Image (cartoon, rainbow, N blue to C red):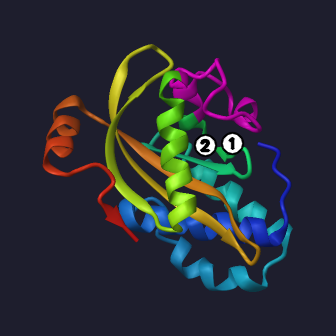
Amino acid sequence: MAVSMTAEQARGILTAYQQVITASWPDLHPEMAAHAPNWSSANAEALERELLGYVRAASSPDSRVRIFWKLLPAYTFGGCNEHFAHDAGLSSAEMQGIDDFDRRLPWVFQAAKYRADDEAVVRSGHSKLNIVERQRGATGTTTWVRVGKTPIRTSTGVIGVFGAYQVLDPKTGRRLFVEKPLGTKKR
């Protein structure tokens, strides 16, 4: 995954990543909390290397979490892990620079809903965590997912949205959907 960003952008993405992961998947990168205090003084190269290290770790066969981030103004994918790209039916490199409306994506017919969710996160400045919803995958099947999204912030304001999700088994997905209204937990 070839990504080039400023230190401030990388810091914003890492901070958003940490917020979603800590809230919803705290066991994914427990070391992140110890590294976070160093982000304020790290250079772009070091921050990008750390970000890509987390992305690689989240791509391991042991990880069930899909991660991605979208950049404003067009909400184009700035990066993702391999699990997310696999769900999309593309490589992580092919994901960069496209948006949810790209016809190659299996969820293209849900793109307007995803864009509305992203815009709501950006507009409000608040995270939407533990959203339970259905998603169409690359194989054409519809699965239940648990999603978390948060704004990516820099000193110039919100520059994007960081998101993560986990595929749920059908029974768990239905149960969580009934138990909790969509996107009610905000931070």
Residue drawn at 59 percent across, 21 percent down: 89
Q: Nearer the viewer, mark 1 or mark 2?
A: 1
Residue drawn at 77 percent across, 38 percent down: 97
Name the kind of residue labelled 2 in the image.
Answer: Asn
Q: Which residues are magenta?
A: 85-108
Q: Which mark is residue 77?
A: 1
Q: Secondary structure at mark 2?
A: loop
Residue drawn at 29 percent across, 59 percent down: 184
From this view, report whether residue 46 is shown above or below residue 51.
below
Residue 169, x across and y down, in percent: 25, 33
In the image shown, does 21 or 98 lie closer to the viewer? 98
In the image shown, does 77 or 17 lie closer to the viewer? 77
Residue drawn at 74 percent across, 38 percent down: 96
Residue 120, x across and y down, in percent: 50, 55
Name the kind of residue labelled 1 in the image.
Answer: Phe
Q: Magenta stretch containing residue 4, yes or no?
A: no
Residue 33, x across and y down, in percent: 52, 78
Find disc 2 in the rendering and name its residue.
Answer: 81
- Quarter occupied by residue 115: top right
Residue 19, x across and y down, in percent: 49, 69
Q: Main secondary structure of the magenta part?
A: loop
